[in-house]
């Protein structure tokens, strides 16, 4: 969106090569962590720091915007390694803005998969909900999935199918 009170989302469609989409499907594990957390606390902390012109938040915001553009180019050019690198950077930038956005429970969820992981991050504000784990290879993603099924990190945790919607983001006002 553009700066100002009137926020009108603009969506830039990405044209990902079929090989990239296949790799994303084969190497991604989308897991509901079993933990819910309201983003309200995280967002309040971030907004307060932003409104105080906290230099760390302002730098992180600049890097998040730049990283989103680099990630979009990685998707369009089919550079899966660059995509994964930006996903890992995104997680760390979220943590720099609010350390509570990545909880110890979520860290512990990812830790056993370290050798198999290319990157991982929480969806949304963080701290729970969904976690995207990206394997270094399709076989690594399968090992991650098997470990999670054998040893779920929470009684409610479960994997979900993951794919990109070819029609892109759709917004509706309810």
Image (cartoon, grey):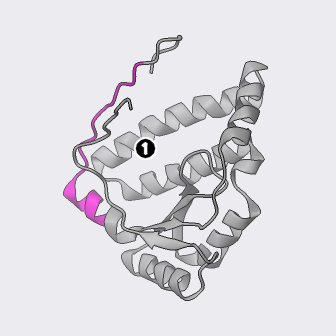
Query: Residue 139: percent from the left, percent from the top?
Result: 40, 81
* Residue 28 figure quarter: bottom left
Judge whether 104 appears above or below 58 on screen: below
x 58%, y 58%: residue: 129
Q: Is residue 24 left or right of residue 45?
A: left
Q: Residues within 10 Å of mark 1 (few under 14, many from 20)?
A: many
Judge whether 157 appears above or below 43 on screen: below
**For the magenta stretch, what is the residue range?**
8-23
Q: Was residue 130 drawn as part of the magenta stretch in this picture?
A: no
Judge whether 146 appears above or below 118 on screen: below
Query: Residue 148: percent from the left, percent from the top?
Result: 54, 80
Which sits in the foreground, 11 or 38?
38
x 75%, y 63%: residue: 104
User: Looking at the magenta stretch, what is its main secondary structure?
Assistant: loop
Q: Which residue is mark 1?
A: 71
Identify the image quadrant of the C terminus: top left
Q: Was residue 20 drawn as part of the magenta stretch in this picture?
A: yes
Identify the image quadrant of the N terminus: top left
């Amino acid at each position: 969106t553009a700066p100002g009170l009137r926020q009108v989302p603009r969506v830039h469609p990405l044209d990902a090569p079929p090989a990239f989409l296949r790799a994303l499907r084969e190497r991604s594990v989308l897991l509901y962590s079993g933990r819910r957390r309201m983003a309200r606390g995280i967002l309040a902390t971030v907004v307060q720091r932003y409104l105080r012109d906290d230099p760390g938040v302002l730098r992180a915001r600049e890097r998040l915007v730049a990283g989103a553009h680099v990630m979009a180019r990685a998707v369009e050019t089919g550079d899966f390694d660059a995509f994964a690198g930006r996903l890992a950077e995104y997680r760390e930038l979220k943590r720099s803005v609010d350390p509570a956005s990545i909880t110890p429970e979520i860290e512990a969820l990812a830790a056993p998969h370290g050798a198999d992981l290319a990157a991982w991050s929480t969806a949304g504000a963080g701290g729970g909900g969904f976690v995207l784990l990206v394997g270094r290879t399709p076989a690594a993603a399968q090992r991650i999935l098997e470990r999670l099924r054998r040893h779920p990190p929470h009684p409610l945790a479960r994997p979900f199918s993951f794919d990109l919607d070819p029609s892109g983001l759709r917004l509706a006002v309810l």
